[in-house]
Image (cartoon, rainbow, N blue to C red):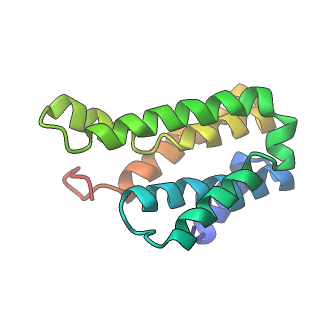
Amino acid sequence: MTRNTADVHLIRRICKENPEAMDFLANYWAPYCHQIDDIIDGERKTPEEIIATFALAALLYNHPFFLRNALALKQVALNVTSTYADTVAWEKSPLSWQREWADHHRHCSNEMAQAVAMICGGYAHARAIMPELRTMAYNEHHDEKGKPV
């Protein structure tokens, strides 16, 4: 994950400066999700690249922040995985509603950011962060006419 200044600032805000949460979200969860997407999109092609993603999963699910909050985060990880599977299955569907649903949910990995925000700062904190994060995710992946890019 390429992190620019805005990304780093947002992660710090999501995590309320909690170093362990920031490490989990920025250095494990985000790269893991991007690498899975790269495998699906055919951008990670070599066995070494794919196996490295599996190795990252082992580290992610044994990260101290994940282990300390496993009861909350395990279900989020499973829900994100299931939702992502639907987005992949429906992104090229002949049914427009499925394509639209897939587009709206393609940033489902942000649900982990919401869970981390709630753990670090409670409901009000997560609510303060999520509209900004959802808007940013939409804008980064759509053109000025709202078409997915």
Query: In the rendering, at what x and y percent does residue 84 appear?
Result: 44, 40
98 in relation to 47, above or below:
above
Query: In the rendering, at what x and y percent does residue 127 appear?
Result: 61, 32
Dividing the picture into quadrants, the one containing residue 72 is top right
Query: In the rendering, at what x and y percent does residue 125 appear?
Result: 70, 35
Nearer to me, 95 or 6 = 95
Dividing the picture into quadrants, the one containing residue 94 is top left
Nearer to me, 99 or 145 = 99
Identity of the residue drawn at 43% across and 70% down? 45
Dividing the picture into quadrants, the one containing residue 30 is bottom right
Query: In the rendering, at what x and y percent does residue 60 appear?
Result: 73, 51
Identity of the residue drawn at 48% across and 32% down? 82
Image position of 32 (left or right of 38): right
Nearer to me, 79 or 53 = 53
Image position of 10 (left or right of 91): right
Give the total number of marks visible in the rendering. 0
10 in relation to 85, above or below:
below
Identity of the residue drawn at 26% across and 53% down? 148
Image position of 41 (left or right of 39): left
- Quarter of the image for the N terminus: give it: bottom right
